[in-house]
């Protein structure tokens, strides 16, 4: 929601941090949209894996060759004649979750004489029923079961990818917002410095017109004023660039209502050094490993790789099964000739397991390193902000004293410009230090999955992202 700076004014409208985050939660970003599509794709893979347990239907119709024995006066002869009786079959098969396969069906043969049917096709029209019971390791959980479980783990990983995309998007929005705020405040600092230089330049121009100083000296101040004007324009261009970059992240760059909007908010107050000292790296790492979506994703990938390896073992190993039906009881045994298929599958899946485990360990190590660096940046920025705040306060007081002395005739007017330039430089450095502190705080919150675990409003999220983790 866009908020006007002043009711009824024509000034650019502004958005604060909470407004921007509320907008970000609505737009969600392209990364989150792609992650949701990937989640849908993973759900379809699960559905396909579950399809292995559905009934499958097979049917056929045609003719088969049969040599019919010729009967004469009720006695069979040695003569035969060719016949093409019609054959129709229908059967259904289903894999049970325990690995057993059930087949139920019907076979029928028609267009043969009763005598021939009796002698040649005593079971021509009959139901068929058989149960295939694996007697090796496949009984209990077949390869399809491991494949289904692997697909479910990958779906969980895709679900957490959506949370990861949300976390990354909110971090980009937050970082873009505070950089826009920094650029806007720096533009204000340069504008205020230009006003001071303009006052001094006007003072020297007046004195030059009165003949108190040479015109050349007044021209020098006009040149300094022109440099300040260029500095203000450069700062304004930087602010516009930062604003456009944030608009692009928010996907509102084409909306007219956002073209002239300004992103304005006070930088968060720095935490006390004693509170920063209480932040325990090991505790933060544990929190991150427990809540970070990418850790959950990688753990799911490790589990999925192991399940796929077990599924491959079930499929490539030898099979020993008991087949029972209306007309048969059989024990079947099959195995591949040679060990290449087994060895190749085992090596391939073991490599996939090793890769997933190495990536998980590397991710855990990277998280620890990132958190250590974020804490160092946060601590360094906190000390810098406190030091520069004191310096800027002294420079502001010094400038105020100089103004009083100039009014009293104790110092020349040029001293005001010198003091204002020193103050502006100090304020620039303080703004940069505040930006570093805010980005480090935002980074620390992102690394401990505060965004991924958050389900509240934009204003609640804004308050969360500018405070230290408990």
Image (cartoon, rainbow, N blue to C red):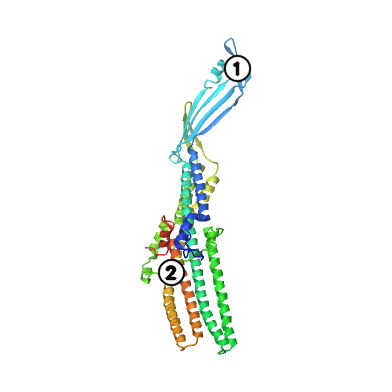
On residue 378, the disc is 2
Circle 2: element type: helix
Q: Which residue is mark 1?
A: 69
Name which quarter of the figure residue 387 lies in: bottom left
Q: Are marks 2 and 1 in contact (CB under 8 Å)?
A: no
Circle 1: element type: strand
The quarter of the image holding the C terminus is bottom left
User: Is 398 positioned to the left or the right of 230 in the image?
Assistant: left
Name which quarter of the figure residue 65 lies in: top right
134 is higher (above) or lower (below) than 444: above
Q: Circle 2: is it few (<14), some (14-19), or many (20+) Cα within 10 Å?
A: many
Q: How many marks?
A: 2
Q: Residue furthest top?
A: 73
Report the mark closest to the observer, 2 or 1.
Answer: 2
Residue 329 pos. (x, y %): 47, 29
Mark 2 → mark 1, Cα distance in angstroms: 98 Å
Residue 256 pos. (x, y %): 55, 59
Please tell me which of labels 2 and 1 falls first in the chain. 1
381 is higher (above) or lower (below) than 461: below
79 is higher (above) or lower (below) than 421: above
Q: Residue at x 50, y 85 (%)?
A: 413
User: Does residue 68 appear in this view?
Assistant: yes
User: Is 230 positioned to the left or the right of 177 in the image?
Assistant: right
82 is higher (above) or lower (below) than 275: above
């Amino acid at each position: 929601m866009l908020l006007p700076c002043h009711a009824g004014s024509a000034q650019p409208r502004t958005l604060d941090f909470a407004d921007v985050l509320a907008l970000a939660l609505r737009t969600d970003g392209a990364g989150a949209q792609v992650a949701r599509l990937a989640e849908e794709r993973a759900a379809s893979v699960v559905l396909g894996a579950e399809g292995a347990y559905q009934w499958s239907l097979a049917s056929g119709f045609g003719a088969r060759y049969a040599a019919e024995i010729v009967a004469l006066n009720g006695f069979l002869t040695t003569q035969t004649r060719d016949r093409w009786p019609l054959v129709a079959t229908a059967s259904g098969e289903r894999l049970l979750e325990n690995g057993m396969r059930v087949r139920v069906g019907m076979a029928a043969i028609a267009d043969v004489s009763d005598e021939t049917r009796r002698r040649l096709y005593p079971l021509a029209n009959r139901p068929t029923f058989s149960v295939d019971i694996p007697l090796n390791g496949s009984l209990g959980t077949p390869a399809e079961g491991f494949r289904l479980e692997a697909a479910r783990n990958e779906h969980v990983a895709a679900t957490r990818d959506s949370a990861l995309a949300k976390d990354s998007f909110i971090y980009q929005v937050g970082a873009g917002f505070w950089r826009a705020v920094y650029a806007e405040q720096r533009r204000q600092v340069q504008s205020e410095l230009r006003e001071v230089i303009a006052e001094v330049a006007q003072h020297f121009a007046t004195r030059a017109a009165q003949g108190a100083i040479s015109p050349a000296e007044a021209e020098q101040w006009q040149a300094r004023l022109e440099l300040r004007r260029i500095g203000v324009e450069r700062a304004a261009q930087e602010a516009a660039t930062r604003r456009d970059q944030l608009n692009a992240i928010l996907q509102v760059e084409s909306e007219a209502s956002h073209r002239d909007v300004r992103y304005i908010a006070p930088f968060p107050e720095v935490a006390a050094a004693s509170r920063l000292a209480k932040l325990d790296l090991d505790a933060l790492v544990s929190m991150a490993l427990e809540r970070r979506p990418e850790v959950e994703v990688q753990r799911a990938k490790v589990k999925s790789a192991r399940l796929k390896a077990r599924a491959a073992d079930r499929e490539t190993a030898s099979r020993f099964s008991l087949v029972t039906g209306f007309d048969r009881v059989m024990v079947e045994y099959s195995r591949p000739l040679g060990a290449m298929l087994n060895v190749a599958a085992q090596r391939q899946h073991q490599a996939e397991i090793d890769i997933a485990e190495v990536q998980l360990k590397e991710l855990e190590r990277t998280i620890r390193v990132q958190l250590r660096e974020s804490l160092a940046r946060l601590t360094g920025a906190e000390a810098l902000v406190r030091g520069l705040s004191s310096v800027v306060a002294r420079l502001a007081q010094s400038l105020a004293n100089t103004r009083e002395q100039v009014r009293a005739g104790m110092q020349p007017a040029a001293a005001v410009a010198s003091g204002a330039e020193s103050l502006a430089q100090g304020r620039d450095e303080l703004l940069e230090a505040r930006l570093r502190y805010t980005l480090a705080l935002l980074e620390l919150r992102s690394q401990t999955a505060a965004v991924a675990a958050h389900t509240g409003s934009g204003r609640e999220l804004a308050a969360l992202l500018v405070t230290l983790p408990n």
